[in-house]
Amino acid sequence: MFLARIISACFAFAALIYGLSLTAPTSPHVPRYPQDSHTNRPTRYPPAPVAVNISELHIAGTYVRAIDGTEFVFQKPLRPSLGTVLFLHGCAHSATDFFPSGSNCPQCIGLPEELKMTRIALEKRYTVVAVSSTDRIRKCWRTDTQTFDGPDYERVNKALREAAVRSLYSPRLPLFAVGISSGGLFATSLPMRLRVSGVNSIVSGAVSSVWNKESPLRKDYPPHVFTHMGLKDKHTAERVRKAMDILETMGTPSMELIVPPQSVTTHFLQDSVSKWDMSNAQELVLALQRGGYLDAHFHLLSDPRRSQWRNSVQHLGTKLGDHFRPDESALSEELNRAWGSHEITADHFEEALEFLETQLHR
């Protein structure tokens, strides 16, 4: 009888602990996700993907520069290609960001988020073609909302023609246009010029004039995925919402993927930049803590684009192989991603591609 009471008490205590764990308060720094009022649309806050060591995947791009200055970098998957993923970078960036430096692309710099996206596309058996914009000063894409014409459209056409000659691109296979920031806006207009199977706009809205009532594409616009950091970037979130409203009236499938801010832990840095080991990541986190740039939960206290965090880590630059220059630095890119306002992110890119794939035979 006494033993039975002890066992019963143990079960009661375990149940109490379990109940408390379900109601434990969350950190005030962890954002709570708003409910999507458009319940008929797929909006996702997926778990962060598990990182894979880029160096083990043999990513090696081949750089091409045509006589007219058209610049692109490509790589084919190991198995027969299922189609092409066209990467369109953001302002201040280039096609060379999507591949590591190598014998066939010494100009490449291989930024971490771009490398992850390249890896995902290659693993899913897509040929990767990354193209540079015509503007090599600001390096933005120029979208013509009236004629959908101009040097950037010609550049993409030229890159794809060159790719077709090299058996990298076939109009008979799917072409997914993936653009970041200004590249995302540009990608939404590409179906006016090319046969595009799907669009993924990252930290960007859409050129809604593409879908006006007179548009020949209004009934046949390809599926669209919006990946953005709307918990802080309310402006982009509103543009995405309006764009999805229009797409819904057109009967075009669309999906919204929201990426929240993240804490700058050793695991975050090591998973983000494969060339850094745990010791490197620990040194960086400690330096940022000592500099006063992280709170108790390892969240950035201010926008890294406006703070002086580089002063705290400059002594680690040579050891880490990072000069910390904006738009060319692995750490700079990852801190911007952790802040969660406006930065390229590979988070949930695989899910975006899978959504577009499911719509191919709709």
Image (cartoon, grey):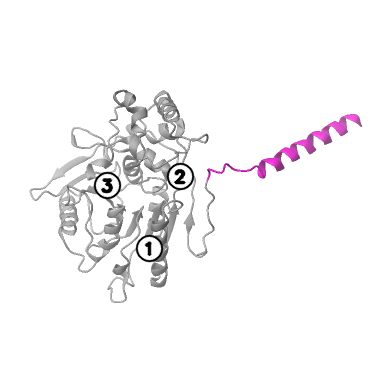
Magenta stretch in the rendered image: 1-30
Query: Percent position (x, y) of residue 43?
Result: 48, 57
Please tell me which of labels 3 and 2 falls first in the chain: 3
Q: Residue at x 37, y 28 (%)?
A: 312
The residue that mark 3 highlights is: 128
Q: Given the image, on which type of amino acid does mark 3 rest?
A: Val
Q: Is residue 251 toward the left or the right of residue 134 in the image?
A: right
Q: Are marks 3 and 2 in contact (CB under 8 Å)?
A: no
Instruction: Specify the amino acid type for callout 2.
Output: Pro
Q: Quadrant of the N terminus?
A: top right
> Does residue 73 appear to the left or right of 45 in the view shown?
left
Closer to the eye: label 1 or 3:
3
Judge left or right: residue 209 versus residue 40: left
Q: Residues within 10 Å of mark 3 (few under 14, many from 20)?
A: many
Q: Mark 2 sits on what residue?
A: 261
The residue under label 1 is 361
